[in-house]
Amino acid sequence: MTEYILQVKDLHTSFFTDAGEVQAVNGVSFNLEAGKILGIVGESGSGKSVTSYSVMRILADTGRITKGEIYFKNEDITKYSEKQMHKFRGKHCSMIFQDPMTSLNPVYTVGNQLMEAILLHTDKSRKQAKERAIEMLELVGVNEPQKRYNQYPYELSGGMRQRVMIAMALACEPDILIADEPTTALDVTIQAQILELMQDLQKRLGMAIILVTHDLGVIAEMCDEIIVMYGGRVCEQGTADDIFYNPCHEYTKGLLRSIPDISGSKKRLTPISGTPINLLNLPKGCAFCARCEKAMKVCLSYQPEELEITPGHYASCWLNVKERMEPGKEEARHEF
């Protein structure tokens, strides 16, 4: 039987603003195995980052988990006190944030910030924490770690700062690393180096990774399992092969059609028409309905059922339901 280090069940997260309730995450469920890499992909505003922030319970003041459970090693962390969450963050689950340029404090040295994380979550002395900080800088490929330890963030390049962020996240050897768009602000060459570093460290340390990104190329290269999100919901989930070679949701297919083809063919890119939905006013039916070329009447009124296409491959699309119905029996469920 498969053991999961993290299980998210029917997670709902909302932000309560002056304009109303923004339903950023609506019933998200997934499992993460120890030592595996799970990718969460989707457009901006699809709920990817909010899902990861919900796991860490670091939502903005207006944000709140309104429903659902998050199990870490069979313990529901939504019931943890802030003191318990303080221990959970860093020691068991760490996060690399989106922008390395702003994630580090500019008035403290790199070494000071690394030491703070180590002293906060371990029982090491200051001398041991300093040795560990320098060791971590060396582990993530920072050249001249002794020198970098005493430098300020502004003295480092973007790639170096992101390596420092990774070193800080891994300093306490967490069970889970959440990487939220870890290469967005970096140039292509540095992106490749950072991703290769993450893969190498994951294999070496045996940790699980949740990789949040909008880049399907990164997802294809890195991930064992993939979740495709739209409008705060999971559209499709499965292995990388399932998603890239047998997509079963129209949104997933749209994302794949929008990837540039480098094979030399003259096939034009096909963007997804329309704009993302307003999370203040979610539709009754499928969130993607207004942008879907194959939308049916049922899509307007009912949320699609999640079907298992092949073992471990799930998609929530009425087209899959329709295909599985016996000829002439469509009316048995809803009007298509």
Image (cartoon, rainbow, N blue to C red):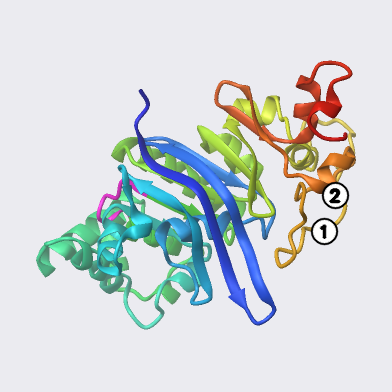
Q: Earlier in the sequence, mark 2 or mark 1?
A: 1
Q: Nearer the viewer, residue 254 or 306?
A: 306
Vertical arrangement, residue 242 with respect to residue 183, above or below = above
Which residue is nearer to you in this view: 227 or 196? 227
Q: Amino acid at mark 2?
A: Arg
Kind of residue indicated by mark 1: Thr
Label 1 secondary element: loop
Left or right for 307, reference 134: right
Residue annotated with mark 2: 291
Do tag 2 and tag 1 residues touch (Cβ < 8 Å)?
yes
The label on residue 86 is none
Decide if residue 234 is on the left or right side of residue 296. left
Asked if residue 226 is positioned above or below residue 284 in the image, the reply reads above
Locate residue 332, reporting x and y percent. 81, 27
Rendering coords of residue 177 (x, y %):
39, 50
Q: Residue furthest top?
A: 327
In the rendered view of the protein, which quadrant contains the C terminus? top right
Q: Is residue 175 above or below residue 56?
A: above
Instruction: For label 1, count other residues whose C-alpha is less than 10 Å away and answer few (under 14), some (14-19) or many (20+).
Output: few
**Residue 20 coordinates in the image, percent (x, y):** 67, 75
243 sits to left or right of 167:
right
Residue 130 point in image, percent of width and height: 18, 65
Badge 2: few (under 14), some or many (20 or more) residues near its Cα, within 10 Å?
A: some
Which residue is label 1 attached to?
Answer: 275
In the rendered structure, which segment of residues is drawn in magenta? 170-176
Q: How many marks?
A: 2
Residue 117: name its quadrant.
bottom left
Tell me how far mark 2 sits from mark 1, CA to CA: 8 Å
